[in-house]
Amino acid sequence: MADSRKRIALKPHMDRIREWVEAGKTDDWIADALGTSASSVQSFRSRNDIYRRERGPREPEVLFEGVLDHGENDGWGLWLDPAVAEDPIWKEHWADVEAVVVKVAEDSIVLEPDAAETPDGDSDGQAWTLVATNGQAEPEPEEAVETAAPKREQGRVKWFDPEKGYGFLVRPTGDDLFVHHSEVEGDPSALSPNGEVEYEVGRNDRGPNARSVRTLG
């Protein structure tokens, strides 16, 4: 059956068509946006040397365009272009997914099917992901690095005010170290002057502080 949509002048839209093609939009998508037929778009591209570039090895196979918005009944979510339902990758790997895991990175938001929600409890080893990025492919995952347990240190209490909820310890180096009552394991009022303590040294925007503080003896 022939496409019944009207033919329009595409020359005024050349820059937009070129941008859309560079962004990976299909002829059907462009035709729908401009209110014309996909065959007209394809013919116009050919006449004006607007070609699709080959996908690089780290680029996604398909781009799903969507927006973060608040639905009328469903609350905040990622709302995708309905045309995604016709994408073969979507049909094969995403059409039946009801729950996802969201991983937020510095330059991307990655959605993965929640293995716990799949019928057999896993995703068959597939690593299909939907990525919302700045136009770049999903970065390769970094290998997990085991981190050593924080080193504990022994010192003594300089002073601690239970009413104010904070005080200072004295480190082996002689430096003062801030301590907040929320970091004391047990009763904070047990921090008496010159009492021996063991702790981890942490840091916040105000400088070094004591964490996981325990009294000794």
Image (tube, rainbow, N blue to C red):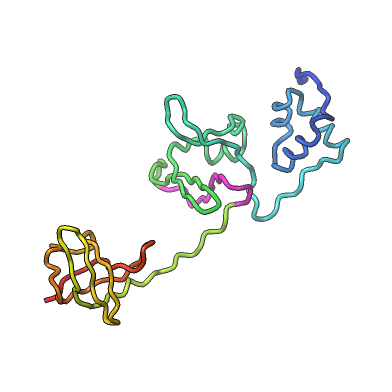
| Residue shown at the point (27%, 67%) measured from the top left | 178
Q: Position of residue 23 (x, y in %)?
A: 70, 42
| Residue shown at the point (75%, 35%) measured from the top left | 16
The magenta stretch spans residue 125: yes
208 vs 58: above or below = below
Q: Quadrant of the C terminus?
A: bottom left
**Which region is colored magenta?**
122-137
Residue placed most toward the observer, 175 or 106: 175
Q: Quadrant of the N terminus?
A: top right
Examine the residues drawn in magenta and state their main secondary structure: loop
Q: Quadrant of residue 162?
A: bottom left
Q: Position of residue 137 (x, y in %)?
A: 61, 51
| Residue shown at the point (73%, 43%) measured from the top left | 22
Q: Does 203 sit left or right of 182 as displayed? A: right
Q: Quadrant of residue 43?
A: top right
Residue placed most toward the observer, 140 or 173: 173
The magenta stretch spans residue 98: no
Q: Position of residue 60 (x, y in %)?
A: 63, 48
71 vs 24: above or below = above
163 vs 151: above or below = above
Q: Does 5 sit left or right of 146 as displayed? A: right
Q: Position of residue 189 (x, y in %)?
A: 12, 64
| Residue shown at the point (24%, 71%) measured from the top left | 199
Residue placed most toward the observer, 174 or 106: 174
